[in-house]
Each structure stands twice: as C-alpha cells, then as structure tokens.
Image (cartoon, helix red, strand yellow):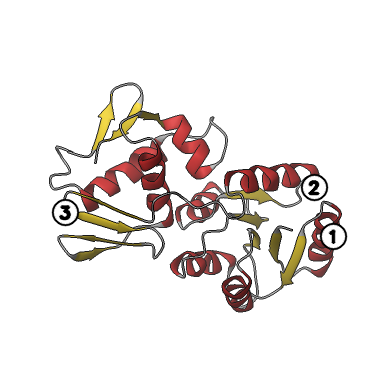
Amino acid sequence: MQKILIVEDEEDVARGLEINLKKEGYRILKTGRGNTAVDLAIKENPHLILLDVMLPGMSGLDVCRELRKKGIEAPIIMLTAKGEEIDRVLGLEIGADDYVIKPFSLRELMARIRVRLRRHPPGLGEGVSKYRFGEVEIDFEKCQATRKGAPVELTHKELDILRLFLRRRGEVVTRDRMLDEVWGYDSSSTTRTVDTHILKLRQKLEPDPATPRYILSVYGEGYKFVG
C-alpha cells in the first residue's frame, strides 16, 4: 500500500484529503506542522507528500527545502492559496514537483497524484547510484557531488536532470521532455527554466562552461549528455 504524507494545518482540508485518499487505497500519514513533517518523512519514507505552503512555524517552502537536504526524494505536491508566479516558481526551484492552487478540484489532484506515483513507483531505483565523468563524481544516493575532489552543491532539480541525462546518455533530450519528466507541469510553460538549470549545471560541472564538453546543446532541439 502506497503511503501519502499530508502536511496541512487546516483540519477540514486535511480530513477531506485523508477520507478521499483512503477511498483510493492509499495509506495516510498526517500532520499540521512543518517540523513534525520533516521527522515523519524521514521515519516513514512516504511515496508522495502533499505539502501546504502556509503552515504555522516552519513554512511549507522551508519544509520542502529541508526534505530535499535530508535526501527525501518522494514527489512533493505543494498546496497553495497563493497565485503569484514567483511563489510557484520558487517552490519548483527548491525541489517541489508540482503545485495545486486552493480551492482545488479533487479530481485534478487525484490525477496529479497518480501521475507522480507512476513516475516514482515504489521500489523503483533511479538506476545507477554513483557516476563519474571527467573530474566529476556524483553520488545520487547521498545527493552529493564533487569536482576535482571538492564538494559541489547540486539542487534536487539539477540531480533529476542528471538522472534523466544518464538514462538518455548520448540521445537528444528535448526541453519539453525535460519539463515533463523533471518538473511535471504542462508544456505551455516556459522552457527558460530548463536553459537556466543547464547553464548552472555547466558552471558547476564543466571545465569550461563557455565551451561545454559533456552537456551539449543541440540547436533547435534541446541537449545531449556525453559524459
């Protein structure tokens, strides 16, 4: 039975989610506080996390950031009443996989949950746990990387991009495919986010970011990893 952690301080919302998710056959964990959510996620290792942005004490964004720091890789769907683009972008940048704006359609939320769980099925590893190319070594299990032996700080999304590149090594990966597999929001969203992340990855990992050796651009298509 797949476990879903609900982090929501509005009891009516949390209870409604719990009832409906149990009907779908999920096992539910529930808390209304951010610091408790981090401890619970580490202890229980849920398959997916529904995380409210506005929480008492530790905010949902801080919880998301801390979960990724602790190596929790379960998909995170943010629940937010805020509609400003900057809030949505910030959540995605720090490691959230998707967002739903309150009041949300239960049917839509259930569909998003199913999509996320299909992409991260229980027991499925991400492939290789360690990988080395050039002067870079990446430990995906520990979410750590080094270059020339020195630590390199990679974000959750940057690690996800590298996992995708390894699965498609030597193939052209389009920007739309990266948006779909790494961010998971619709293809009408801007591809600038992809280009920004690739630029940062090159700055961190390439010997000469201006003339990349491993993460190559394919004009009009996307990128190819040859490391």
> Which label was assigned to residue 16?
1
Measured Cα–Cα span from mark 1 to mark 3: 51 Å
Measured Cα–Cα span from mark 2 to mark 1: 10 Å
> Which label was assigned to residue 3?
none
Lateral position of residue 116 relative to residue 210, left or right: right
N-terminal-most mark, 1 or 3: 1
Three-letter amino acid code at the position of disc 1: Gly
Q: Secondary structure at mark 1?
A: helix
Look at the picture and state if 173 lies above or below 60: above
Location of residue 179 in the rendering, given as x and y in whole percent from the top left corner: 48, 37
- Find residue 49 and report its image quarter: bottom right
Location of residue 17 in the rendering, given as x and y in whole percent from the top left corner: 80, 58
Three-letter amino acid code at the position of disc 2: Leu
Q: Residue at x 84, y 60 (%)?
A: 16
Q: Secondary structure at mark 3?
A: loop
Three-letter amino acid code at the position of disc 3: Glu
Location of residue 206 in the rendering, given as x and y in whole percent from the top left corner: 19, 47
N-terminal-most mark, 2 or 1: 1
Whether tag 2 and tag 1 are in contact, CB under 8 A, the answer is: yes
Residue 124 versus residue 213: which sits nearer the camera? 124
Placement of the N terminus among the 4 image quadrants: bottom right
User: Which residue is the site of mark 2?
Assistant: 106
Measured Cα–Cα span from mark 2 to mark 3: 47 Å
Residue 86 versus residue 61: which sits nearer the camera? 61
Q: Residue at x 62, y 56 (%)?
A: 78
The crowd level at tag 3 (other Cα within 10 Å; few <14, some 14-19, many 20+) is: few
The crowd level at tag 2 (other Cα within 10 Å; few <14, some 14-19, many 20+) is: few
Lateral position of residue 181 relative to residue 79, left or right: left
User: Which residue is the site of mark 3?
Assistant: 135
